[in-house]
Amino acid sequence: MTHPSQPTDALPRTGPPAHTQEMPAVPPPPATPAGDQHDAAAFVPGLAAPPAAPSSRRWSYGPRLRAIALGVTLVLLALVFLTWGLAVGREPLWSAATLWSVFAFACTAWILLAFVPDAPGRSRLRPRFGWRAALGGLAGLAVFWLLVALPQAATNRGFLLTAAFAAAIAAVWTSPNRPVAGRD
C-alpha cells in the first residue's frame, strides 16, 4: 500500500517519459523594419513569438454596420410613432386626411434609402444617392409636420407626430453615407 503523498502509476502515461522529451528549437527573432519599435519591444529572446492575431474572417460589427442598424431602428421607430399619431384621436388622420397620411408615411419610409450602401462599380446610382434621396423624404416629412402636426402640437397626436419627425431627423443624421467634413 502506498502513502497518499507518494506518486502512483495508476494513471497511464500517454507520451514518452519526461526525461526523454526534447526541448523545441527557439525560432530566430523576426526581422523588423527599422521604424517598427512596437514589435521589437514585444519580442523577448528565448520565448516563442506572440500568438497570431485572430482571423480577419470573423464577423466584425464595425462602426458602419452599427450606424446602419441604429439608423434603420430610428426609421422604424419613426414609422411606429407616425402610424400611432395618425390613428390616435376622435377622428384618425388616416380617414380625415388620407392623402397627407399616405404622403407622410411614404416620406418616412423613403428615408430608409439613406442606409443602402453605396456600391461603386456595381451600381448605376451616383455616390450618396441614398442619402440625398433620404433628405428629400425628410423635407417632405417636414412639410407634413409644419402643415398638419404643428397646428395640433398641444395634443397627443401632435406629440406623437413630433416624436416621429425627431426620430426621422436622427435617422438621417446617423446615416453612414452622410458627408462629414474631414471624413471624405
Image: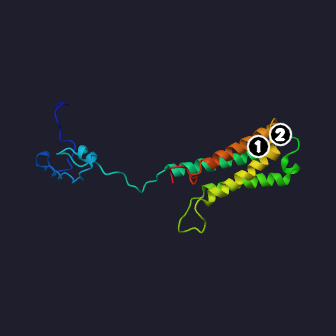
Kindly identify the residue that appears in the image at 68 percent across and 47 percent down: 168
Q: Residue at x 26, y 50 (%)?
A: 35
* Label 2: element kind: helix
Q: In what quadrant of the picture does the N terminus appear? A: top left
Mark closest to the chain's N terminus, 2 or 1: 2
The quadrant in which residue 117 appears is bottom right
Considering every residue shown, the one lying at the far front of the view is 181
Residue 161: image tag: 1
Residue in view at x 58 percent, y 49 percent: 69
Out of 17 and 21, give the one closest to the viewer: 21
Relative to residue 51, is residue 157 drawn left or right? right
Decide if residue 78 is on the left or right side of residue 86. left
79 shown above or below 116 = above
Query: Is label 1 in a helix, a strand or a loop?
Result: helix
Residue 105 point in image, percent of width and height: 75, 52
**Where's residue 98, x and y in %?**
85, 53
Tag 2: amino acid: Gln
- Mark 2 and mark 1 residues within 8 Å of each other at the beta carbon: yes
How many numbered discs?
A: 2
Residues at marks 2 and 1, CA–CA distance in whole angstroms: 9 Å
Identify the residue at horizontal 26%, vertical 46% (top origin). 37
* Crowd class of label 2 (few under 14; some 14 to 19; many from 20; radius 10 Å): some
Please name the residue that numbered disc 2 is placed on: 152
Determine if residue 108 is in view: no
